[in-house]
Amino acid sequence: MERPAPADPERGERRAPVCGATSTTVTSETPAAIDAQAEVSADPPTPKGGRSSRVNWLLILGVSFVVTLGALILFPPFDKHEPEADCDYPVCYINGTLEFPFPHVVWAPDGSTPPKPSELITFYPSISSTILTMWIVMAVVLVGSFLMVRRSTLVPRRAQNVFEWFYEFLSDFGLGIAGPAAKPYIPLFIAFFLLILFCNWSGLIPPVGRIEELRAPTSDVNITLGLALVSFIYFEFQGFRRLGVGGYLGKFFPLYEFKHGIGAGGIALFVGLVELMLEFVKPITLSMRLFGNIYGGEVALGVITALTIAFIPVGLLGLEVMLNAIQALIFSILTLIFIVLAIESHEHEEGEVAEEALDAIRGSEPPQLQPAH
């Protein structure tokens, strides 16, 4: 005769009858009790609605209007071409927002003659508004980075965690584009990106550009050309250091191809000279692309702001934030790629250019049609 198993008073259990060698345990936590307990312990659902997003957008519009109106009152516009004339809307407002290509000179040696405001590239020893703003941006970036990583611990705090995530994200992005050979140069890539990014964004702050002593550094072609020359000198130095003088110059003067024939050597030498010419074009393209986008964006933002005061520039301001970040990323990633190309040896390609050139000249191998993709 089956007898029920004794109950455990401490656990609130009741055992089922034992039949043979098997037994089951039935607890007081039935499915209904579990569901009830889950409903009690669960957090109450938070209501979802679109009111918060509308409030945020209205808050952004209101803050933009207040900041723009405050900048208009504190720094009233004046016609830079005719400072003594009355400021009439809209011509004076537009001229007051347009910057000359040459920045304002904050300090210059006594007796020196400043260049004309219309000049683009100058060699004038002075401290301009763009240099002063760049020093301020550099100090902010360095101090901010130091404060975020000081007293680093194994379990990162919030600021350290943000910095490490940002560094790892850019590192993975750079390695994914330039390859494993770019790993030693990732710090330079991130440094270029941070400096140029905040230099670009500085021009979106109302005091910068409203007063003559402050101006976005990358809206001055002299600053962007200086950054491009630093990049150019660095990746050329890395090419000579990694491959040696003969190995690096051999990329542009492949005289070894003449052993495959005069025609092949001549074609290879022509290609090398074209690459050498393009090598000196790199700093020009780096500087002009960055300068043109930032200066053009500031002109467009200034004109729209002068004509509409607040509401329409909010969308353009958001677009400029994104485009400025993209331009900083383009400059820094191109620098990283140029370094990888400079340290890459062409020894494994020796003879390949000559053979392809000879086949093309002699017509020994008919062209093969490739399927379109």
Image: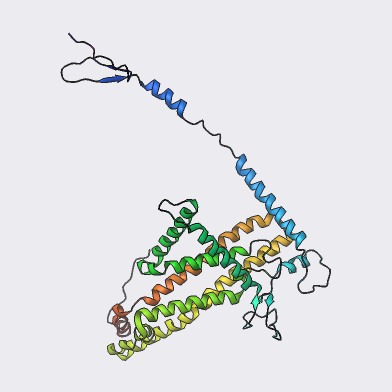
Residue 136 part of the magenta segment: no
Determine the image quadrant of residue 89: bottom right
Q: Residue at x 46, y 56 (%)?
A: 151
Tell me the quadrant of the picture where the C terminus can be found: bottom left
Residue 318 x/y as whole percent: 60, 57
Q: Nearer the viewer, residue 250 or 181?
A: 181
Residues rendered magenta in the picture: 3-8
Residue 197: in sight, yes or no?
A: yes
Tell me the quadrant of the picture where the N terminus can be found: top left
Q: Residue at x 45, y 80 (%)?
A: 279
Residue 187 x/y as whole percent: 44, 67
Determine the image quadrant of residue 266: bottom left
Residue 7 part of the magenta segment: yes
Q: Is residue 347 left or right of residue 21?
A: right
In the current view of this chain or complex, which residue is farthest to the top?
A: 1
Q: Residue at x 48, y 75 (%)?
A: 231
Residue 53 x/y as whole percent: 60, 44
Name above or below for residue 153 compared with residue 246: above
Q: Main secondary structure of the magenta part?
A: loop
Residue 199: in sight, yes or no?
A: no
Q: Nearer the viewer, residue 275 or 192?
A: 192
Q: Is residue 303 left or right of residue 323?
A: right
Residue 311 x/y as whole percent: 69, 54
Q: Residue at x 44, y 70 (%)?
A: 336
Q: Is residue 363 left or right of residue 297?
A: left
Name above or below for residue 156 compared with residue 170: above
